[in-house]
Image (spheres, rainbow, N blue to C red):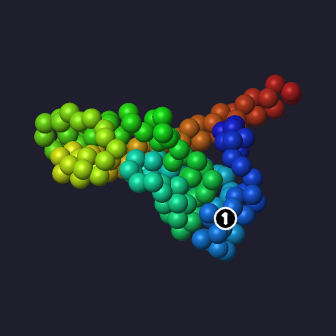
Amino acid sequence: MLKKFIKRFLPDHHKIMQHKALSVFGTLLHDPNLWHLNRRSASGAFGLGLFFAFWPVPFQMWLAAAVAIPLRVNLPLSVATVWITNPFTMPPIFYMAYLVGVKVLGSPERKFAFELSWHWVVESVETIGPAFILGCGICSVFFGLVGYFSLNYIWRWSTIKAWRTRVQNRADRK
């Protein structure tokens, strides 16, 4: 079942609650719904994690955690899903977001070469920045919704399949 598969990869919530970086949230982490894994909390956490994965900011995990708490979705899953954008996947994902922004704005695609300088950052914000930010926003909402509804459907499908298997096994035993 999908629940068992996901639980295999999630860390122990007692260890997470004692992590220094999460001490900012204090007693808010003691809500059992943040650690419970069901269809609602898993699909919400997955959608939330995908939503923040497309934000071009360095603190995506904290944002996912901060929003998961009031929404009462699975905290570890929402934080882990953000890691879809990691140092290896970030360049192609953000380039795709830039292309989406270019298409929506109808502006020409600009060629650029990455430089590690303040001048390049300022110049990029003026030239490719609007298309990039718009593309990140569109991809963020789109993939967040797709992730939410996809996991919700897969969870329902696996539950129905497991239920039908149990019914069939009971019928076979008679």
Q: Depth check: give the residue in front, 107 or 126.
A: 126
**Image quadrant in which the C terminus is located:** top right
The correct choice, above or below, for 171 with respect to 145 in the image is above
The image position of residue 68, as x and y in percent, is 54, 61
Residue for point 27% across, 40% down: 98
Residue 71 in view (yes/no): no
Q: Residue pushed farthest bottom?
A: 27
Report the side of 22 relative to 71 (left or right).
right
Residue identifier under label 1: 20
Q: Residue pushed farthest top?
A: 172
Report the side of 33 relative to 58 (left or right).
right
The image position of residue 93, as x and y in percent, is 38, 37
Residue for point 65% across, 33% down: 161
Asked where in the image residue 116 lies, by quadrant, the reply is top left
The image position of residue 80, as x and y in percent, is 58, 48
Residue for point 70% across, 58% down: 16
**Image quadrant in which the N terminus is located:** top right
Residue 12 in view (yes/no): yes
Asked where in the image residue 89 lies, by quadrant, the reply is top left
The image position of residue 27, as x and y in percent, is 67, 74
Q: Disc count in the image?
A: 1
Label 1: few (<14), some (14–19) or many (≥20) C-alpha neighbours in 10 Å: few
Q: Residue pushed farthest left?
A: 107
Report the side of 52 relative to 13 (left or right).
left
Helix, strand or loop under label 1: helix
Three-letter amino acid code of the residue under disc 1: Lys
